[in-house]
Structures are given as structure tokens and as C-alpha cells.
Amino acid sequence: MRISTIMPAYNSERYIAPALDSVLSQTRPPDEIIVVDDGSTDGTLDVLRAFANDIRIIRQQKCGISRALNVAIAAATGDAFAFLDCDDLWAPEKLQIQNDVLSAERDLEAVFGAVHQFASPELPPETVSEFVVPDGPQPGISKNTLLIRRAGFERIGRFDEHLVVADFVDWYARANVLNLRWRMLPQVVALRRHHPGNAGRHMRAQQVGETLYALNRSLNMRRRK
């Protein structure tokens, strides 16, 4: 199975290099890595150029994460998609574990795995004290923990480009209505970084509004179904 790794990026010069390193150090490497720079105004592009031999870089004007994801998906050539946010990390065996399961179980469309959350280590204690960081791993319903067959993803559909921060909430709600065949694996496959720039932290009101919209739309889909 050929795996395409997809990463949207915006003003992520501080954390995108470790994110890409975690992809490149996979025990089962991805077959391609596509990074869409969503109109960054900092040094993100310079960091990406340092990885130019290993990744494909697509640049676009600032259109939002959903558009960046869809652009990468349109360019991808893989039989399966894996996603990573530009400030987070994969565990080294993420793709190996999930590829083995999908390869062995042909009726399964997608797998998730556990996520471990952490406060970014360079932050001062007074900043970290403001975060709620769960202890230990948790089941990860997240793009970062997902490996999905292309056919399964296309059956559910692409990300709603009207949404800025609840892109995955909307997609996952649709996936449940349309009965995506998935499994949660117990292994930790991703690490979520807490820092002041997390979209859910500085765009909280918009996230709540978009989440309510996505859930309401999924309820309407279920009623029609």
C-alpha cells in the first residue's frame, strides 16, 4: 500500500522541522510527503526548503487549513492518506503499526490510534500552568492518528473549506453518519503539542461555533438517511 503523508502549514517555523523529522524517521517511511504552505508570513518556507529533497512543497495564498488539506489530497498519489499537523509529532512506528492492520484486514477502511499530549518543552512554567494537559495516552480521534484508504476517504468526501478550525470535527461527523469502517488501536501513534499558538486556544469562539454547525449538519444528514 502506497501512503501519502499530508501536512498543512501556516506560520509554523518553530515546530515544523520536528514534525517533519518525525515523519521522515518512521520505521515504515511514507511513499510521499506533501506540505501545503497556506500563505505563511514567517520563516516557514525557509524551513521547508531545507527538506526539499524529501518533501513536495505546494504554496497557496492564505485560504485556510481545509483548503490546504484538499489541495494536498488532490495532488497525492497514494492508496492511503496519513495527516500530521505542523506543530505535532508522530511516534516512530505510527505508519508501520497502522499499515500492518489495514494490509491484513481488507474490509477495514481506516484506523486511529492513541495520542499522548505534552506541553512544548521550551515554554516557561507560568505558561504551562495555564494549559490542561491530560496525563497518559488517550484514544485519539484526530487527523494526526488516522490512516485511511483513499477509497474510504473519497467515500466520505473532502474537508469543508468554509470551516477554519473544525475541519476534522465536520469530516468525522460525516464519517460516522456514512458508517466509515474504522478501528481504534491501543498503541500511541501521535503526540499533540500544547503551546500558545494552538488554533483551539486562540480561536476558541470560532471553534465552538463551527463545531456546533458541524454537529447540526451531521444530525440533519442522519435524519435524511
Image (cartoon, grey):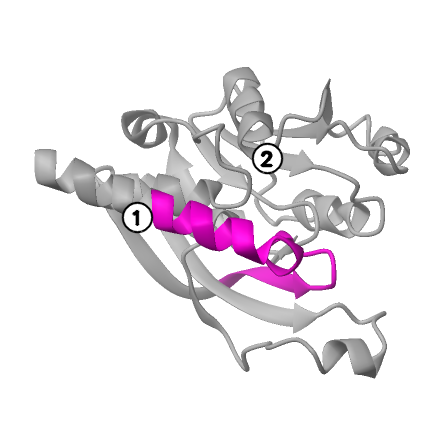
Residue 70 percent location from the top left of the image: 51, 24
The residue positioned 80% from the left and 32% from the top of the image is 40
Residue 191 percent location from the top left of the image: 60, 62
Task: Report whether residue 139 is seen.
Answer: yes
User: In the depicted view, which residue is nearer to us: 204 or 69?
Assistant: 204
5 up-or-down from 18: above or below:
above
Q: Which residues are magenta?
A: 188-213
Residue 147 percent location from the top left of the image: 43, 43
The residue positioned 86% from the left and 29% from the top of the image is 49
| Drawn side of residue 106 relative to residue 153, left or right | left
Identify the residue under disc 1.
215
Identify the residue under disc 2.
65
Q: Which amino acid lies under the numbered mark 2 shown in the image of this protein?
A: Ile
How would you rate the neighbour count of disc 1 (Cα within 10 Å): few for under 14, some for 14-19, many for 20 or more? some
Is residue 154 located in the magenta-colored stretch of the structure? no
| Drawn side of residue 94 relative to residue 120, left or right | left
**Looking at the rendering, which quadrant does residue 221 occupy?**
top left
Residue 152 percent location from the top left of the image: 30, 31
User: In the depicted view, which residue is nearer to us: 24 or 211?
Assistant: 211
